[in-house]
Image (spheres, grey):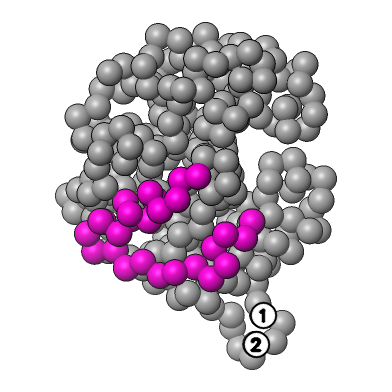
Amino acid sequence: MRVALFVTCVNDALHPATGIATVRLLERLGVDVDFPLAQTCCGQPQYNAGHRRAAEPLVRRTVRAFAPYTHVVTPSGSCAAMVREHYPRFGENGLPGRTYELTEFLVDVLGVTDVGAHFPHTVTYHPSCHGLRLLRLGDRPLRLLAAVAGIELRELPGAEECCGFGGTFAVKNPAVSVAMGRDKLDAATATGAAVLCGADNSCLVHLDGIARRTAPGTEDRAGPPPAPPRPVHIAEILAATEDDPYRFPEPVR
C-alpha cells in the first residue's frame, strides 16, 4: 500500500497542524505516508466559481502528483468530494477511486475505530456538507470519536444544517453566510461542550472567525454570554494520546 497525504490548501496555509496530526496518526497505525511536493490546489475554488477552464490545469497537476500512489488520504471532506465527484467530468477517473477522506480511510481501509487516542474534553461534532451529502461519511467520524479515551461527546442540535461557509458562497453572500454561522455557533454553544470538532478546517475557520468577531446569542441574555466551543479538527483529536496530549493555544475551560 503506497499512501500519500493530500494536505489541501486550507490546511497548508492556515492549519498545518492538521496535516502533521494526520501523518502522526497514520504512522502510529503502521502506515508509511509520503507527501508529494508537486501537489497544489485541487481546483475546487475555481470550479465552484464556474471557471472550469481555470480549474483544469490544477486538476491535471493533482492527478500527476498522486499518480504513483494506491491510496490518497486527505483531512478534508471538501477536497475529497472535489476529486471524487467532479474530476470524472474532466475525464479523470483513476484518482477519484483512490482518494479517501481521513475517517473513511481509517474505518473502511484500515478497519479501525479505536485509534488509541486520548482527549479528556467535552466535544460536539459538526458534519460538514461535503462529507455529509457528497461523501456520505455517515457515522464514521462519530464512531471514531466515541472510541477516544476520556472524551465526552455531546449531540449537536441541527447538526445537518450548513454552517454557512460554502466556499465562494461566504464571499458572494456574506450576510447570509454569517447568519447561518451564528445559528451553528449558538447550537454548538448550547451543548456546553468545550470543543467543536469537524473534519473540514474551512468550516471551522469560518465558525471561529464569527466567534472572534461576534458574541452569538447575546441579544436576549443578561450578563456575559457563554463562550463558544473551540474549533479542533478531528485529525488532531485522533492524533492526541495520553503521552502526547493535544495542547490548546490557551487554557481550556
Mark 1 is on which residue type? Thr
* Quadrant of the frame with the N terminus: top left
Residue in the image at 51% along x and 54% along y: 127
Location of the C terminus (image quadrant)? bottom left
Q: Quadrant of residue 178?
A: bottom right
Who is closer to the viewer here, 206 or 145?
145
Disc number for residue 125: none
Q: CA distance from mark 1 to mark 2?
A: 5 Å
Can you say whether 77 is above or below 97 in the image?
below
Which residue is more in the foreground, 207 or 244? 207
| Coordinates of residue 110 in the picture (x, y in percent) | 26, 34
Q: Residues within 10 Å of mark 1 (few under 14, many from 20)?
A: few
In the image, which disc is placed on residue 221? 2
Region in magenta: 136-162
Label 2: state its secondary structure.
Answer: loop
For residue 84, above or below residue 62? below
Q: Is residue 55 left or right of residue 38?
A: right
Q: Main secondary structure of the magenta part?
A: loop
Q: Residue at x 55, y 28 (%)?
A: 84
Q: Marks 2 and 1: in contact by CB < 8 Å?
A: yes
Name the image quarter holding residue 21: top left
Relative height, residue 170 to residue 71 (above, below): below
Residue shown at the point (71%, 82%) measured from the top left: 219
Residue 119 screen position, x and y as percent? 28, 58
Q: What residue type is disc 2 on?
A: Arg
Asked if 66 appears above or below 183 in the picture, the reply is: above
| Residue drawn where x is 77% and y is 16% of the image | 53
Which residue corresponds to mark 1? Answer: 218
Along the viewing direction, whichever of 250 and 68 lies nearer the viewer: 68
* Left or right side of 130 for 192: left
